[in-house]
Amino acid sequence: CTVRSTSTSTSTSNRKPRPSYIGPRDRFWRHHAVHQTLIIDGVEHYQTLHTCLHTSPNLTPDDFHSLSLIPSNRTIGRTILENPDSKFGNVVLVEIVNAMTPIHVLAVQTLASCIRTHIPSLHETRPMYLELGYDIDPGLGGNSPTHLAPLIGI
């Protein structure tokens, strides 16, 4: 898998943008997967997370095999184009229908649980009333994200 971008730096205004090769998509996490190492805050976590995932009652060995399969019914849903006249260019949001199978969702939830248990620095609790500067919670709820993005590819 490779990612291609478009270079718009041209010397004349009538030239069309040319494709630029920026490298394989997995270049950021390939090293961790190949060498089975993941150091966060000076602590090695790869084997801990690997053991947590593989000993979880949520996932079977067949489930791990299914994770490598890409859904064949993926399609592009809605496309939202916002601020086409912005100085930063177009902001595009594309909905991917059937992007993940139920087993992919279960695996991500299991990974999040393992991260909350073993790497609590990647989890935070943010009550909405504190985010908005209130002293008392009027029942606004909150947001408690677990930061998975850097670990999903590994």
Image (cartoon, grey):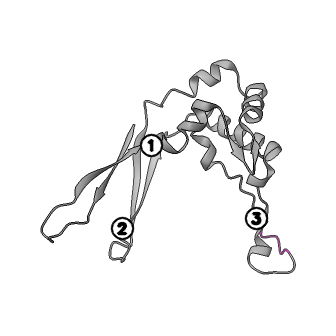
How packed is label 2: few (under 14 Cα within 10 Å), some, or many (20 or more)?
few
User: Picture coordinates of residue 17 (x, y %)?
Assistant: 21, 60
Q: Give left or right: position of 151 versus 52.
A: left
Q: Residues within 10 Å of mark 1 (few under 14, many from 20)?
A: few
Disc 2 marks a residue whose amino acid type is Asn
Mark positioned earlier in the residue sequence (1 or 2): 1
Which amino acid lies under the numbered mark 3 shown in the image of this protein?
Gly
- Per the image, the residue denoted by label 2 is 90
Residue plotted at (33% across, 72% down): 84
**Disc assigned to residue 142:** 3
Mark 2 and mark 3 lie on one chain; the one further toward the N terminus is 2
The vertical placement of 22 against 142, above or below, is above
Q: Position of residue 118 (x, y in %)?
A: 81, 43
Foreground label between 1 and 3: 1
Residue 80: x, y in percent? 40, 61
Could you say which is closer to the camera, residue 44 or residue 69? 44
Q: Give the Cα separation between the discs numbered 1 and 3.
A: 33 Å
Q: Residue at x 77, y 81 (%)?
A: 133
Residue 9 seen by the camera: yes
Identify the residue position indicated by label 1 in the image.
25
Q: Which of labels 1 and 2 is toward the front?
A: 1
**Quadrant in the picture for the C terminus:** top right
User: From the viewer's perspective, is residue 19 above or below residue 36?
Assistant: below
